[in-house]
Image (cartoon, helix red, strand yellow):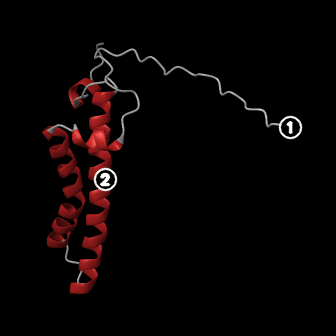
Amino acid sequence: MAAEQQQRPYVPSKALDTPYPLIDNDPHIKRVIRYARPSDYAAGTAIGLFGPGMMLLWNQISPSHVGKGGFASIMRLSGAIGVVAAFIYTTERSTSEFMGQGTITWMQKFSYSN
């Protein structure tokens, strides 16, 4: 007796109502990184450098006196978190372009008139 083969139902992709045309609704991560704009990379770099930069600033304002080894480990941790945050933020901005949302500026985000 042969095993019955079940067919999975076809589910069409969701149509988005956006002011920009949809480029790809399920982009691969390689394509997202390859097509990221320079402004996406600049914003991601700024986000990534914020954590280690604030740690250096806080150590200058109020020294921790933990020694060279203690501060180095904190800088490595904040640097690693910054790299992950920069990657996530860059891919989010690039993916929003693929989904047809465009780049939402901070003025548009807080604007009450639609």
Q: Nearer the viewer, residue 81 or 31?
A: 31
Place residue 29 in its image quadrant.
top left
For label 1, the SS is: loop
Residue 60, compared with residue 13, is above or below; it is below
Measuring 21% from the left and 85% from the top, which residue is drawn there? 68
Place residue 67 in its image quadrant.
bottom left
Q: Residues within 10 Å of mark 1 (few under 14, many from 20)?
A: few
Label 2 or label 1, whichever comes before in sequence order: 1
Tell whether 8 sits left or right of 15: right
Measuring 33% from the left and 48% from the top, which residue is drawn there? 88
Where's residue 72, x and y in %? 24, 78
Where's residue 95, x and y in %? 32, 34
Q: Residue furthest right?
A: 1
Where's residue 96, x and y in %? 31, 31
Residue 65, compared with residue 9, is above or below; it is below
Q: Nearer the viewer, mark 2 or mark 1?
A: 1
Question: Could you tell me the amino acid type at mark 1?
Answer: Met
Q: Nearer the viewer, residue 25 or 2?
A: 2
For label 2, the SS is: helix
Tell whether 45 sits left or right of 2: left
- Residue beneath disc 1: 1
Residue 63, compared with residue 7, is above or below; it is below
Place residue 98 in its image quadrant.
top left
Q: Residue furthest front?
A: 1
- Quarter holding the N terminus is top right
Residue 85 marker: 2
Q: Nearer the viewer, residue 46 or 7?
A: 7
